[in-house]
Image (tube, rainbow, N blue to C red):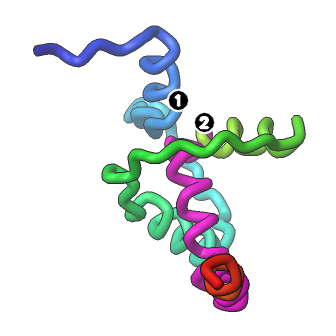
Amino acid sequence: MTKITSLADEIRNRIAQPPAENPEQPKTPKAKKPKAEEAEILRLIRAYDNANHKSLVHVRFDEKTVQTLNHFKMATGVDVTRLVAFAVQQLFEGNPELKAIIKQFIQNMTL
């Protein structure tokens, strides 16, 4: 069965792909900015596997954040769902006190 994509999906995929180089144009060296940290975080986000995630959570963001998320998706090709799932996982891993608060609540609830 062939993959069915909408016109919008096709455009997003084209935008996410790097442009093909034209060999006729002279190449000018560009000053590269150090993006080692940025490349590493993008690598981690892209490597994050959310294929087995089946639960949905409805969240609300302010307009500026939504616009930033949409621009991020267009710039990197990373789906917003993957980015948010990665960010939440990092939040809980980096702040174990949040898990302690949840554990305490569950223990108090069962008493």
Q: Is residue 95 visible?
A: no
Determine whether the residue tagged by mark 2 lies in a helix, strand or loop: helix
Q: Which residues are magenta?
A: 74-102
**Residue 47: mark in rendering:** none
Q: Nearer the viewer, residue 97 or 43?
A: 97
CA distance separating discs 2 and 1: 7 Å
Q: Position of residue 40 (x, y in %)?
A: 52, 74
Q: Nearer the viewer, mark 2 or mark 1?
A: 2
Q: Is residue 71 above or below residue 109?
A: above
In the image, is 7 to the left or to the right of 87? left
**Of all residues shown, which one is farthest toward the front?**
111
Residue type, label 1: Ile
Residue 21 shown left or right of residue 37 in the figure: left
Q: Residue at x 46, y 34 (%)?
A: 19
Q: Residue 83 lies in magenta, yes or no?
A: yes
Kind of residue sitting beneath label 2: Met
**Res 92 → quadrant:** bottom right
Instruction: Name the residue at 46% across, 39% down.
Output: 18
Q: Is residue 23 visible?
A: yes
Does residue 93 appear to the left or right of 10 in the view shown?
right
Q: Residue at the left extreme?
A: 1
Instruction: Quadrant for residue 65, please give it.
Output: top right
Whether pointer 2 and pointer 1 mark residues with C-beta atoms closer than 8 Å, the reply is yes
Residue 53 appears at what percent x and percent y?
39, 51
**Place of residue 69 in the rendered image (x, y in percent of width and height, measured from the top left):** 71, 43
Q: Which residue is mark 1?
A: 15
* Near-viewer residue (89 or 72): 89
Magenta stretch: dominant secondary structure: helix
Q: Quadrant of the C terminus?
A: bottom right
**Residue denoted by label 2:** 74
